[in-house]
């Protein structure tokens, strides 16, 4: 079986790291680090992991955490902007924060808010917080999100970023069995360039892409 990068489809990635449970490969083209598909959880196992999450809009600590993306993104948005929170999870919170700021929001989550009709609309901004590391086909899924943005629209992403192989080996983030894709700043820059987007990094685990 020929392995291919799930972001850019380049064949023959190299082994980046191994632990007791999984293998991690890195793409030579886009530098994405990923777990091969045969080592992913199935949908039932994946949902069982997410069901343990206890996030809610009433949790001020969680709001503070999301503020790392909310604050720099909301500052860019005009009045009346319409957004989608993609992968909102069992306790949608970021969408509530934008609504409190006077912006109309739709939500989508494959397990908890599976209304695919919202994916047929266009948006001024889309957020994906702690989502991209779960995607089994990030190339397809991220491209679809960009297609749903109006020209001048923003895609805001929050995920922890790969730094070095040494740090990766000690990284708690890889212990979550639902985390299968690990992005670095270089990967995000490569992807933005391929899609004709500009990208900025307001924080260590946030990236904001702009569609031109």
Image: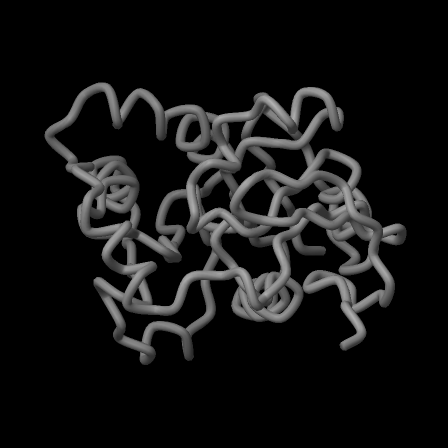
Q: In the figure, is residue 179 to the left or right of 166?
A: left
Determine whether 48 is above or below 140 in the image. Answer: above
Q: Residue at x 30, y 47 (%)?
A: 103
In the image, residue 52 lies at what x, y percent? 19, 44
Q: Residue at x 39, y 68 (%)?
A: 42
Q: Residue at x 27, y 50 (%)?
A: 50
In the image, residue 39 lies at what x, y percent? 54, 61
Determine whether 160 is above or below 190 in the image. Answer: above
Closer to us: 62 or 166: 166
Q: Residue at x 22, y 47 (%)?
A: 92
What is the total number of numbered labels drawn onto the structure image?
Answer: 0
Quadrant of the snapshot with the N terminus: bottom right
Q: In the figure, is residue 94 to the left or right of 211?
A: left
Closer to us: 28 or 119: 28
Closer to us: 106 or 171: 171
Determine whether 81 is above or below 171 in the image. Answer: below
Quadrant of the snapshot with the C terminus: bottom right
The colouring scheme, among rainbow, by chain, secondary structure or one colour, is: one colour
Determine whether 20 is above or below 148 in the image. Answer: above
Considering every residue shown, the one lying at the far left of the view is 58
Closer to us: 124 or 17: 17
Q: In the figure, is residue 186 to the left or right of 94?
A: right
In the image, residue 94 lies at what x, y percent? 29, 40
In the image, residue 134 lies at what x, y percent? 47, 53
Considering every residue shown, the one lying at the far front of the view is 20
> Quarter of the image holding residue 43?
bottom left
């Amino acid at each position: 079986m020929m392995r291919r990068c799930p972001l850019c489809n380049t064949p023959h990635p190299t082994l980046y790291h191994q632990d007791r449970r999984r293998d991690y490969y890195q793409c030579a083209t886009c530098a994405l680090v990923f777990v091969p598909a045969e080592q992913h959880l199935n949908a039932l196992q994946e949902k069982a992991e997410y069901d343990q999450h206890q996030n809610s809009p009433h949790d001020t600590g969680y709001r503070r955490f999301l503020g790392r993306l909310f604050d720099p993104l909301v500052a860019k948005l005009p009045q009346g902007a319409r957004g989608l929170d993609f992968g909102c999870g069992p306790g949608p919170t970021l969408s509530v924060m934008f609504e409190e700021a006077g912006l109309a929001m739709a939500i989508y989550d494959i397990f908890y808010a599976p209304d695919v009709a919202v994916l047929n609309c266009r948006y001024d901004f889309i957020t994906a917080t702690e989502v991209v590391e779960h995607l089994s086909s990030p190339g397809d899924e991220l491209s679809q999100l960009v297609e749903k943005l109006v020209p001048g629209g923003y895609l805001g992403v929050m995920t922890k970023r790969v730094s070095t192989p040494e740090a990766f080996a000690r990284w708690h983030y890889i212990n979550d069995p639902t985390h299968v894709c690990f992005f670095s700043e270089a990967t995000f820059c490569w992807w933005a360039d391929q899609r004709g987007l500009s990208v900025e990094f307001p924080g260590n685990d946030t990236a904001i892409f702009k569609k031109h």
